[in-house]
Amino acid sequence: MHKRFNLKAWLLLLPALLLLFAFTHWPTMRTFWRSANWAKTDVAEPKFVGTENFALLLDDPVFWKVLENNFWYAIGTVPTSIALAILMAIWVNGKIRCAGLLRLAFFTPTILPMITVANIWLFFYSPDIGLFDQLLRSIGIDGPNWLGDPDMALSSLIIMTIWKEAGFFMIFYLAALQTLSPELYQAARLEGAGPWRIFRRITFPLLMPTTLFVLINALLNAFKLVDHIFILTKGGPNNATNLLLYYIYETAFSFLDSYYAATLTVVMLVILALIAFVQMVLFDRKIHYK
């Protein structure tokens, strides 16, 4: 009877396991295999080259520029998005008028398709006719070339990403806030604690499980941007907005070098695995689970 029950359980899991293997594990294994091989075209017979692709990677100046861009992009988007999400969640969780409307307004950018968001911000950033330039011109200031200036382009992408992601992360914090016991806050107020002390000593520590979840997702998102770059800048000017996943896409589908793209993908997988591991090791000890 026990064996029959296990068989039924595995049969129920089989469709999900097949999909997981077909669309996750098998492509990952193929990517590692392709990173150790090379051929002129995808139809040619590949030749085993070992670590030669990785040696080429170390000598690739675009790769190092892309890694630097991704680092600053993550630094610019992740902490700010999380901080804004917490502030918005605390605000709409309070007893204020039109709280439902505010929640909808904050969450709306999240439900918009990524291509739509990119086109909206393309209008904002367009020189002369864009919304930002028109607003600046109304007060006598000439707007910069938001997407054409190498010193401004990445910052412009960061602002757009924060606008889109903060509302999404707010939903998780709002759900977490609504599970916290009101008695904790009543006791703290009776002890004379102010709003900042309550947040630092009660709210934020109890939100740490949510923060870890949001932090991992935010960092993953920082390495997954393709659509917006394709519409807004195509990685330019002079690779100023080229991020790792877009460089992989460009290498595979524009330069038609799928073996080098596989090598880049392996590097990205290793980076993401290390980030997730460090987050779990460093933050898990500081988290208070219920």
Image: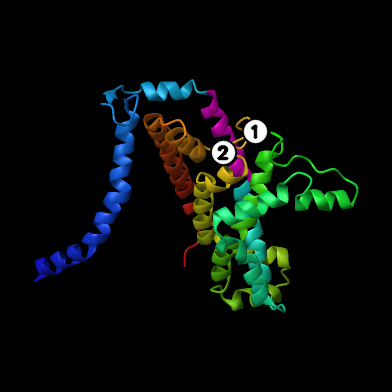
Amino acid type shown at disc 1: Pro
Q: Observer-nearest residue: 70 or 37? A: 37
Residue located 27% across and 50% down the image:
22
In x, y percent, where is residue 53? 38, 24
Within 10 Å of disc 1 (Cα), the crowding (few <14, some 14-19, many 20+) is some
Left or right of residue 72: residue 8: left
Residue 43 visible in this rendered orientation of the protein: yes
Q: Secondary structure at mark 1?
A: loop
Within 10 Å of disc 2 (Cα), the crowding (few <14, some 14-19, many 20+) is many
Q: Quadrant of residue 172?
A: bottom right
In x, y percent, where is residue 110? 57, 61
N-terminal of the pair, mark 2 or mark 1, is 2
Q: Observer-nearest residue: 178 or 250? A: 250
Residue located 52% across and 49% down the image:
221
Residue positioned most to the right: 140
In space, the residues marked 2 and 1 are separated at their CA atoms by 15 Å
Task: Kindly identify which residue carries mark 2.
Answer: 70
Disc 2 vs disc 1: Cβ atoms closer than 8 Å?
no
Left or right of residue 284: residue 228: right
Residue 285 visible in this rendered orientation of the protein: no
In x, y percent, where is residue 230? 56, 43
Task: Kindly identify which residue carries mark 1.
Answer: 237
Amino acid type shown at disc 2: Asn
Left or right of residue 23: residue 227: right
Magenta extent: 61-76
Q: Which tag is nearer the camera, tag 2 or tag 1?
A: 1
Q: Observer-nearest residue: 87 or 201? A: 87
Residue located 71% across and 63% down the image:
196
In x, y percent, where is residue 26? 28, 44
Quadrant location, the N terminus: bottom left
Q: Is residue 156 magenta?
A: no
